[in-house]
Amino acid sequence: MIGIQPDEISSLIREQINNYDQTVCTSHIGTVVQSADGMARAYGLDQVMMGELVEFEDRTLGIVLNLEVNNVGIMILGNSRTIIEGTSVKATGKIAHIPVGKNYLGRIIDALGNPVDGKGDIYTEDTSLIEPPAPGIISRAPITEPIHTGIITIDSMIPIGRGQRELIIGDRQTGKTSLAIDTILNQKDEGVICIYIAIGQKASSVRSIAHILQEKGALEYTTILSASSEESAALQYIAPYTGTAIGEYFMHQGQSVLIIYDDLSKHATAYRQLSLILRRPPGREAYPGDVFYAHSKLLERSAKLNPKLGGGSITAIPIIETQASDVSAYIPTNVISITDGQIFLSGDLFNSGVRPAINIGISVSRVGSSAQTKAIKKISGKLKLELSQFYELETFSQFTSDLDRSTKNQLARGQRLREILKQPQYSPIPVHEQVAIIYAATNNFLDDIPIKNIKQFIEYLKTTIKNRGTKYTKLIMKSKDLEEKTEQALKELIIEAKESFATHST
Ligand code: ATP
Ligand code: MG
């Protein structure tokens, strides 16, 4: 009989104890106690953080928005019908993030970064927080480079710089989206990456925007993020933050990014809906008290980074829809105060045929003029002055019929100026052509052309520059200034265009 030595046993036990290695795996699991309208309340998730991602039984994700005494409020990111009372929900320990990467270009995605264009999966190498902190003061650089919209009125009188936030504001159907789309189209040769974020739009409008961008060759440098009106309020609320996270990826690579938020009025409405369901106390116009914060933390993320950080930038163009031009409503005043300038679109101008319907008198850009190229800066001062005198005179002259000769002349010139600023949709004008058009108008070259023919002449001038203006184009592209020899070349071009226009139109 083999005897078992007691000390042998104890050494075995001791060895086992020493080698005892157990990874303790704890997970915080809670239970849904209420679920309605895209929001859920869960009991038992004591340790979750604000903004943490949680996963429901059927793998739908959610974001924790409210931490209360014995339950947490969760925004459901997906189909909320399968989430009912009793569904279990697991904390993930991670703050909400999405995949980011260059493969998003040319794609249409939803608010969580999933493709919705049927072109297959998007492979990405990185992930990013949906709401990282905005760049601080030290990380930023002054705004010195322009971003050209291709709209004469904006580039000459309300210039936008890279890293700026410029608001487009106006009533419904005044051409807000069209301005933004034209700006995207104009980035074709400028190396700017564009992100169009559609919040609460009709899915069909987003489709047609995608179609236009594709047709004009602009989709390849653009990502369209769509949280359309049939999507839940949660997805509409989160959409601008995820879209900006994708933009930040490119900004940190040193690239220039343009983000369109179309529109933040609908974003505010989605946030109001979420907050009311969460039973947060309503404030002015029933919006939650922190709706200002929701927009300011978003727009604060656009920046021009300093050269040490790569010098990339995010330029933000948020859009706000007003009711009957009331800019003193809650959301418009909020966003006006956050942005660095605004472009007002007027329904009256739009209906009287002035399109784009920009009200120049009350539109401003607070930082863009330091980024404007010298050439356009030189000639836009005169344009602005003459236009504002014209508007004043026009109102005044409505009350009288006998005007003296000089007033009549001034009115006629003003009308010509207004004519050159009209632009059809989807036809942004490159800056060197803008300079030529404004130069011709402010230096009396158009005075002998009847107003009804101005549009036609502009087209003529543009073709002349394309076909015969190599010298002028080269000079202005190189120095970005209107030096004497450039001006001379331009004058010759304008005279040439006028001569051939006169022979062809008679
Ligand atoms: P909504 O309030 O519905 O979002 P919106 O303000 O974004 O409207 P758009 O959808 O851009 O306006 O334009 C409204 C209509 O005006 C469209 O049918 C568009 O084709 C037309 N439009 C916009 N800009 C111009 C322009 N420069 N010239 C001619 N038509 C234009
Ligand atoms: Mg629109």
Image: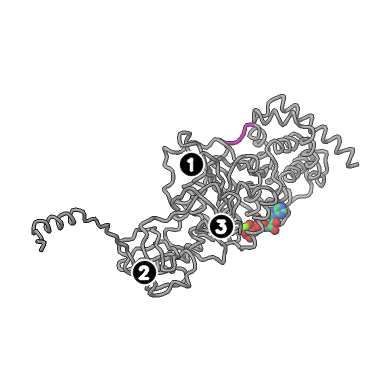
Q: Given the image, on which type of amino acid does mark 2 rest?
A: Ala
Q: Secondary structure at mark 2?
A: strand
Q: Given the image, on which type of amino acid does mark 3 rest?
A: Pro
**Residue range (magenta):** 370-374
Q: Residues within 10 Å of mark 3 (few under 14, many from 20)?
A: some
Where is residue 101 drawn, in percent x and y?
52, 48
Decide if residue 336 is in sight here.
Answer: no
Q: Secondary structure at mark 1?
A: helix
Q: Which mark is residue 252?
A: 1
Q: Which mark is residue 42?
A: 2
Marks 1 and 2, how far apart at CA? 37 Å
Where is residue 260 drawn, in percent x and y?
57, 51
Q: Which mark is residue 115?
A: 3
Where is residue 200 drawn, in percent x and y?
56, 62
Q: Given the image, on which type of amino acid does mark 1 rest?
A: His
Using the image, determine if residue 387 lies above or below residue 2. above
Sequence order check: which comes first, mark 2 or mark 3? 2
Where is residue 112 drawn, in percent x and y?
50, 58
